Every structure is written in structure tokens, then in C-alpha cells.
Amino acid sequence: METGININMTDDGNMNFCYETGNASCIMAITPSTIRVFIYMFIGSTVSLLTIGGNLLVITSILYFKQLHTPTNYLILSLAVADLLVGTLVLLFNMALSVRSCLYFGDLVCKMRRGIDISLMTSSILNLCCISIDRYFAVCQPLTYRTKINDRAVVIMILVSWAVSAVSGFGIIFLGLKNTVCEGRCFIFNIPNSNLIGPVVSFYLPVIIMLSIYLKIFFEAQKQIHSIQNTTCQSTKSGATVNKMERKATKTLAVVMGVFLFCWTPFFLSTTFNPATDYSVPSPLLETLVWLGWSNSMLNPFVYGFFYSWFRSAFRMLISGKTFHSNLTYAKL
């Protein structure tokens, strides 16, 4: 998202433009103060570095340690690749756009930038959706899980996720919608229909699917807990074990869905209802909300990586440098 509500004007009242020639040049926004520039660069670089570092740890761990070569972790690997590309291609470029209101590299580059932005955002969300499907079969259909969720099924899910993401990003930008690119700026105004198609494909539909799946998982886990409780001795020890399992299942679902919804819901709600309010949502607010959404790519390694003990062990080995001194490919995590 781009900033620039306030107009930069000279002392005699004339407006400044990004380029002096032609009517296509954009009005130059007031240059941010030194403090704001520092805040933008500090927050942007910190989020970007944490996103890149965290997802590199996840990717390296899955590729290096044989114990992590499972269908579930391949889905996490695909998610980490999408989030890594968000940190390298999206966050750094948009940090520059936040600092400078006049930044233009040509029509094609601006379209590519927006297409990559939408594609990677959608890919990250769809990979989360695929992980929820994997968890559904693991919890609700454990006897047939290994036959239904195998390497072939995971590869298909990953390919479909990236294909849909590419179509939703580059297809909408290059084929389906009109856009306006102003000389001196690198932004795209989509026609109102894009505000319905994009959020539905990229957010609302995956959210409905994930909520339905995780609710089904939660109720199935509760049923299994009660079944175990009814078939075992009603001792204090067994009751404590059941309560611990229940708390862990509830915490897992709350962390997974809570972080995701916290990061992305405000942005998509604002972009959905913004046309209905005659685009009254301020650009700085939209910019803040989209950065909150991108921070989900930074948090995913913590949610899907540090939450599991085997990933924590893999991270410690990689960070400590033990993998450089000995072959730990088949180490037990």
C-alpha cells in the first residue's frame, strides 16, 4: 500500500509533482520527517530480517534432517518458501514505497511488483489452508491418513496452491482489471470488482474452509478425549492426563487461527468495505494494516516451527553450528 494523502506544496501555493513533464505525473506527497523515515526503515528492516531468518531456519531444517521429511512438513516447507519470498521481494520494496512517495520503475515493473505481492500473500494463506486439511485427516481419519495424505497428494496440493496464487495475482493485474499507473509513482488502482474477487479468493474462502476444518478437528479431539476417559480408570492421574490433552488441543487451535485472523482480518475488512464508504479509509491506516498482515509471514515460523519440539531441536543444531562439524542428517530430534 502506498502513502501520500497530504499534498506537497511550495511556498507560493503551487503543487509539486513527481515529474515536471506531462499531465500523467502524480502529486508529490509531503516528505516524511526524519523520525518517520527512521521508524519506517527500522520496523520494515526488522520485520523483513526476522521473516527471512525464521523461514530460512524452517526451510533448512526440513531439507537437512531426514526425520523431518514427512508430507506435513513438506506443506510447512511450501509455506516457508512463500513467507521467505514475502520477506525478500515484498517487504523491502514496500518499505521503500513507505519512505518515498515518488518511486516509479515503469508500468511493467509496477504491475510485476503488485502481482508478486498478491500472489505471495495468497500462496501463504492457501498453504495454511492445506496444512489444516492435512491436520483434519491426521486427527479425524487417522487410520486412512497415510494412504490419503502421501507425497503425491501433498505435491498436488502445493502445485494447486501456487497455481491459484499466480492466477489471482498476475491474472487479475495483467488480464482481468483496468489499472492506473502514474508517472513518478508505483501504485495501481483496481476497479471496484477487484475488491470483491481478490478478498474472496485470497482470504474469505480459505478462512471459511479453515474455520470449518479446525472446528471439526476440535470436536473430534473432544470426542476422542471423552472416549479415552470413559474406557480408562477414573483416577486422578488419568483425569489430569485428559485435562492436559484438552488444554493442548485448545491452545493449538487458538494459536493457529488466532495469529492468522489477528494479522489479516483488519486489512481485508478495510479493503472490502472501503469502496462502500467512498474510499474514506486513510492510506496510512491501510498501510499499517497491510504491514500487520505481512507480519504473519514473520510469525509463521514461530507458530509452525518453534511450537514443535523437533523443530526447536533442529533450530538449536543449526544456530549452534553443529551441522558444520558433523553429519547430523539422520540425527534424532
Image (tube, rainbow, N blue to C red):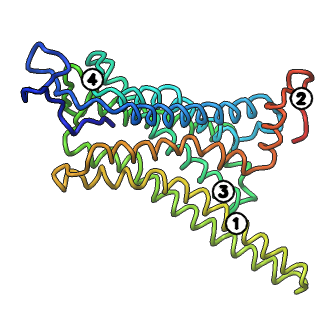
Residue drawn at (46%, 46%) of the image? 293
Mark 1 and mark 2 in contact? Answer it, CB < 8 Å. no
Disc 4 to disc 2: CB gap under 8 Å: no
- Mark 2 sits on what residue? 328
Q: In the drawing, does residue 287 fall left or right of residue 295? A: left
Upstream in sequence: badge 1 or badge 3 = 3
At x 20% / y 20%, what residue is drawn?
18
Picture residue at 76% right of the left edge, 50% below the top:
308
Amino acid at circle 4 = Cys
Please give the name of the residue rendered at 20% of the width and 51% of the height, measured from the top-left corner.
280
Classify 197 as above or below 277.
above
Q: Position of residue 31 (x, y in %)?
A: 28, 29
- The residues bearing labels 1 and 4 have C-alpha atoms spaced at a distance of 49 Å
Q: Nearer the viewer, mark 4 or mark 3?
A: 4
| Kind of residue at disc 3 | Phe
In space, the residues marked 4 and 2 are separated at their CA atoms by 50 Å
Image quadrant in which the C terminus is located: top right
Q: Position of residue 304 (x, y in %)?
A: 66, 47
Do the residues under discs 4 and 3 have CB atoms within 8 angstroms? no
Tag 1: amino acid:
Ala
**CA neighbours of label 1 inside 10 A, class few (<14), some (14 to 19), many (20+):** some
Left or right of residue 259, residue 227 in this image = right
The answer to which image quadrant residue 187 occupies is top left
- Measured in 3D between alpha carbons, the distance from the residue under mark 3 to the one under mark 2, in whole angstroms, is 31 Å
Residue pointed to by mark 3? 137
Dot 2 lies on which element? loop
Which label sits on residue 102? 4
Secondary structure state at the residue bearing disc 4? loop
Quadrant of the rendered structure where residue 96 is?
top left
Which tag, 4 or 3, sits closer to the chain's start?
A: 4
